[in-house]
Amino acid sequence: METNLDLINQYVKSVVEKEQLLEKLNLTVLSEQDMHKLMLLTCTINELVGRMVDAGLIQIEIKK
């Protein structure tokens, strides 16, 4: 079973990987493979945020 710490660690790892890819934009054009990885990481981060909300680790407030 996945612990809350595992969930947080997965989220942090995904955010770091995404940030590394975004930094690459300043140096060179993203390859098709990097763009695909960026999209997958974005999906992973979104899924992890949802699971963190479900686990009660974070709350999201939406303002109009």
Image (cartoon, rainbow, N blue to C red):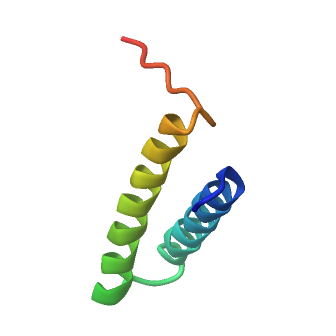
In-image side of 43 versus 26 (left or right):
left
Quarter of the image that includes the C terminus: top left
Q: Give coordinates of residue 17: x percent, y percent.
A: 57, 72
63 to 22, vertically: above or below: above
36 to 55, vertically: above or below: below
Foreground residue among 24 and 40: 40
Q: Give coordinates of residue 28: x percent, y percent.
A: 46, 84
In-image side of 28 versus 58 (left or right):
left
Residue at horizontal 71 percent and vertical 55 percent from the top: 5
17 to 8, vertically: above or below: below
Residue at horizontal 55 percent and vertical 39 percent from the top: 55
**Residue positioned most to the top:** 64
Say which quarter of the image contains residue 3. Answer: bottom right
Quarter of the image that includes the N terminus: bottom right
Foreground residue among 26 and 62: 62
Residue at horizontal 49 percent and vertical 19 percent from the top: 61
